[in-house]
């Protein structure tokens, strides 16, 4: 895992855009995409470039169960709003939050990921170390599956909803193994709220208690952060 630290968010996002453009120039076609506050400035910056994804495919990490694609807090809506309306891909996929049968839906989505292996995966990180919606304790062998969200995850995401009661209790997510199959992974940890989890990630051994530590066994992971090392603070 290579880590690059930036003294400003502006520099960090500029670097992230450059990495994505380089991946694309080097032939990446299939992009795993992420949502969350962390990704909003990234997508805003991408939209200002002339990058063309019209021959690429995108696959989102996760989606809330129970929200239709037109719901303003669904990840389908988020992706259209922040990226896909401005930068359309040849095809864009997310798990279907309204799928009737979770087993059929997770098999469908995992099948797509196996049919179109990811060249590039973008990741944020949850305050409890989750990637996608893989909560602590998730098997590192997991494929796309249905999860029950931790209360802390619902609380962290409640800021996007009018009240915590509206935050879904379940989601579909790519599994850890689905994520780890990507050829190249870029994780962004931005803002003070991610300080503790980033330090945990860097200090922890490979453990399912901190899902993001799975990445330590991946050959091509880059972490960008605006957080400084403990000794450099003050
Ligand atoms: N499922 C998403 C994750 O993919 C994301 O990484 C995390 C952090 O989001 P934020 O960037 O808003 O802190 O939030 C959600 O839980």
Image: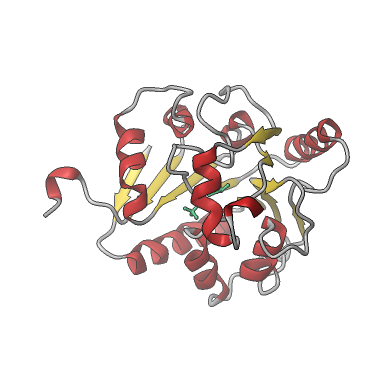
Q: Residue at x 50, y 38 (%)?
A: 130
| Quadrant (top left, top right, bottom left, bottom right) of the C terminus | bottom left
Q: Position of residue 174 (x, y in %)?
A: 66, 38
Q: Position of residue 213 (x, y in %)?
A: 43, 30
Left or right of 32, for residue 95 = right
Q: Position of residue 18 (x, y in %)?
A: 45, 63
Q: Position of residue 173 (x, y in %)?
A: 66, 39
Left or right of 129, for residue 193 = left
Query: Residue 55 falls in which quadrant of the image?
Result: bottom right
12 w.r.t. 194: above or below:
below
| Quadrant (top left, top right, bottom left, bottom right) of the N terminus | top left
Res 155 visible:
yes
Q: Residue at x 78, y 35 (%)?
A: 106
Query: Residue 191 falls in which quadrant of the image?
Result: bottom left
Q: Nearer the viewer, residue 3 or 119?
A: 3
Task: Tell me how many marks there are.
Answer: 0
Q: Nearer the viewer, residue 227 or 216?
A: 227
Left or right of 230, for residue 122 = right
């Amino acid at each position: 895992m290579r880590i690059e630290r930036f003294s400003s968010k502006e520099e960090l996002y500029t670097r992230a855009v450059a990495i994505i453009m380089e991946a694309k120039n080097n032939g990446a076609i299939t992009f795993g995409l992420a949502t969350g506050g962390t990704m909003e400035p990234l997508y805003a910056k991408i939209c200002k470039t002339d990058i063309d994804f019209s021959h690429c495919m995108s696959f989102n990490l996760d989606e809330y169960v129970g929200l239709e694609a037109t719901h303003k807090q669904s990840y389908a809506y988020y992706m259209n709003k922040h990226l896909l309306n401005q930068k359309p891909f040849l095809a864009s996929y997310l798990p279907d939050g309204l799928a009737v049968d979770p087993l059929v839906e997770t098999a469908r989505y995992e099948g797509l990921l196996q049919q179109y292996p990811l060249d590039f995966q973008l990741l944020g990180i949850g305050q409890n170390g989750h990637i996608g919606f893989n909560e602590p304790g998730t098997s590192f062998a997991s494929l796309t599956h249905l999860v029950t969200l931790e209360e802390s995850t619902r609380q962290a995401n409640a800021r996007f909803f009018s009240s915590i009661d509206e935050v879904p209790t379940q989601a579909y997510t790519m599994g850890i193994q689905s994520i780890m199959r990507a050829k190249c992974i870029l994780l962004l940890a931005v803002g003070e709220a991610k300080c503790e989890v980033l330090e945990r990630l860097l200090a922890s051994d490979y453990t399912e208690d901190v899902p993001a530590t799975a990445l330590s066994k991946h050959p091509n992971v880059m972490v960008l952060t605006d957080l400084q090392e403990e000794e450099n603070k003050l």
